[in-house]
Amino acid sequence: MIIDRYDLDLIRPAPKNDIPEGSPQPAMVYRIHFTVQDLARTRVAEGPMPLHELELAARAVQSRSQSARFGAWRHRARAQLSAIRMALSLMPAVGSSPAFFSPAKVGPVEELLDQVRSTPGERVRRNLLEVAPHRPSLPEWAHRLADDASLFAELCTGLGHLHACLLAPYWAQFTEQLAVDRALRLQQLLTGGVEYLLTQVNPLWMRWNPPILEIRMLSGADRDLHLEGQGFLLVPSMFCDRAIVTRGRPAAVSYPAYPNQQRPLELTIPASTPGQDRSPAVSSLLGRTRTAVLTTIAEHQGCTTKELAARAGIAPASASEHATVLREAGLARSLRHRNSVLHTLTPLGLAVLNARQEG
């Protein structure tokens, strides 16, 4: 996967008057051309992409932008980075990085790291040659990676440590927000089709001008990408605050994974994890009806209150009441979309259901 103009479009802060409030959408300069087949194959990523997200995080931790949102996270992370500078140096705040290092794939991070470790030397060499013209400051040792197995293994170990530092403490928080975002996108798809989805997913930085999706880029780059029937993937991200184009099969665009783009996801280390002891108040929630409601939400993520009531066999008012209690207990999350409220499960809610089943 190759990320276009990553250095300029993710890191460089927008001018203060770049998007005046209430102004019309500015002209876009990256044009993605859709065919009928591409529209039919447009979808939202089915889950988090750990190493793709790690690259975004690695660049963000080295940047100075978005200090209000990332300041505390950067302060915590930078204290642990001295031992993993090798991996970090291939994903700088400004500049290209080799594609083998951050595959845009869904799956457990351990499996994805194993895939990186097994990358053929020829591909490592080819990817490094691709980025070399854009990275005159590429470390000298990087040119030996394709032929030095121990050096490459050291790099991959550093990549795992980087994930443990930058992403692992926040992963449950991110996957919860991702479920909410997916529920919203599904509702947009159901109510307005692909056109409405492409219009609403990231309106500040993306504009659907059929049959072209226009991406606003701060670099001023002017280019075209023809999908040619390979489809298109929308990738919600915790560290992307604009729109990042990734060329591949299929091509993808990363966008901020928060429905209200004026209130982005804040990075906070949770005081407790779903696996820890739970209070008696949480356990007391699992009566017969409320358990049915929680189970229904788990099996039908993003369901509306009306759908929840029908599937659980209760009145809409009762479904709304139970969903409110579950939300206040941290077991479910609700998002208002138009005239509906969409319900999703939180990691804590999933843990409670799993513990009940195991018991």
Image (cartoon, helix red, strand yellow):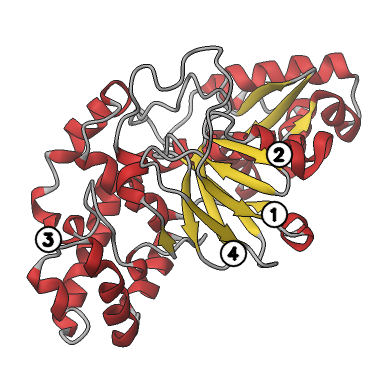
| Residue found 47% across the figure and 57% down from its top | 246
Q: Earlier in the sequence, mark 1 or mark 4?
A: 1
Q: Is residue 300 left or right of residue 119?
A: right
Instruction: Check disc 1 and give the amino acid type.
Output: Thr
Specify which label sits upstream in the sequence, 2 or 4: 2
Position in image of residue 342 (x %, y %): 72, 27
- N-terminal of the two: label 1 or label 3? 1
Q: Is residue 336 above or below residue 121?
A: above
Mark 3 neighbour class, 10 Å CA radius: few under 14, some 14 to 19, many 20 or more: few
When the figure is inspected, residue 145 is found, relative to residue 243, above or below; the finding is below
- Circle 4 residue: 250
Tag of residue 197: 2
Q: Residue at x 29, y 20 (%)?
A: 68
Mark positioned earlier in the residue sequence (4 or 3): 3
Q: Nearer the viewer, residue 271 or 277?
A: 271
Dot 3 corresponds to which residue? 137
Residue 112, percent from left and from top: 41, 67
The foreground one among 234 and 179 is 234
The disc labelled 3 sits on which kind of residue?
Answer: Ser
- Image spot of residue 319 (x, y percent): 81, 21
Label 2–label 4 contact, CB within 8 A: no
